[in-house]
Amino acid sequence: MNEVNRTLFIPLYGKAMVSKKNIILSDPFAEKIWEKEAFQVKGKSGSKWLAYNMAMRARIFDEWTDSMVEQDPGALVLHIGCGLDSRCQRIKNHPKLWLDCDFPDVIAMRRNYYEETAIYQMRELNASDPEQVKALPDSDNVIVVLEGISMYLTNDQLRAFMAAIEDKYKSVHILMDIYTGFGAKASKYKNPINDVGVTTVYGIDDIDGLLEGLQTGFKAEHTMTPASLVNELQGFDKSFFKLMFTGKMYNRIYRLVELERLDPGS
């Protein structure tokens, strides 16, 4: 497993730890997988602050995905860079087809824990290859979950991915977390992914510029650390987390954006 793929253990550990505390995110499957995999986390990767962040991010993505599926249960859900995440089980509403996508060695590991059904499948996919994107299942509408992946793609690769998605699907809904340019530079010194050997990530400062010429456009920006979830923490943890991860400085580093391309015929 290469360095980028090993980053999947960082959010897995965070979600398992927080789930055991019975706060923010209920994820018994993460707890189960973590107990079996027991990948050694070190340095910042084992930080409780990072665990809180990962769990809150997952919760926001869960709620958004659930809402999108509720509005359009006939849509295809693409979870790109799924790792070992159990979002397919955590959400309440289920689409016509859910596809968890990642690199071959990740999917091979994932098959140890997940079974395919008529509405749930796993697919080997390199998001930087538009030809692989074009080979995804057909559907009029698609809901795309891009959690923790955009920073491993260059802006050109990410734009090519978006172009391939909108060429294939009439209606597109995307939720994507991104580093800013400043955040990408800062990650060389303070990012937990450094602990598994990843030293190069990419940031986005101009969403409109990234999407220029595409029909997919910016819809909204969301917070990954809403007060309702921060308030599930207690005492010092709550005060420190609120100070460090909910202000303007945090937003200068890390953002969560929703993109949309509507079917012109709808």
Image (spheres, rainbow, N blue to C red):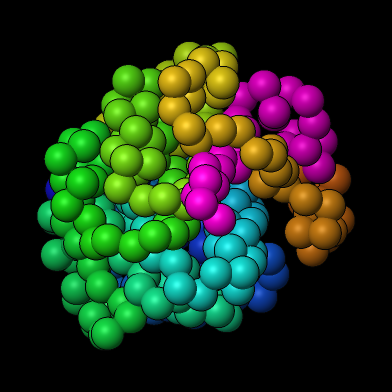
Above-or-below relation of 170 to 167: below
Q: 138 or 130: which is nearer to us?
A: 138
Q: In the rendered picture of this protein, how many numbered marks are placed on residues?
A: 0
In which image quadrant can residue 89 be found?
Answer: bottom left
Q: Is residue 138 visible?
A: yes
Position of the C terminus, as image quadrant, is bottom right
Q: Is residue 257 left or right of residue 234?
A: left
Image coordinates for residue 166, horizontal then vertical, percent: 38, 41
Residue at image point 21% right, 37% down: 130
Q: 48 or 151: which is nearer to us?
A: 151
In which image quadrant can residue 72 be found?
Answer: bottom right
Q: 175 or 172: which is nearer to us?
A: 172
Q: Is residue 103 visible?
A: no
Residue 264 in magenta? yes
Q: Is residue 136 left or right of residue 70?
A: left
Residue at image point 30% right, 47% down: 168
Image coordinates for residue 140, horizontal then vertical, percent: 39, 60
Image coordinates for residue 188, horizontal then vertical, percent: 43, 19
Q: Is residue 179 left or right of residue 246?
A: left
Part of the protein shown in magenta? 242-266
Image coordinates for residue 176, horizontal then vertical, percent: 51, 42
Residue 143 in magenta? no
Residue at image point 50% right, 35% down: 216
Above-or-below relation of 199 to 51: above
Q: Is residue 61 left or right of residue 171?
A: right
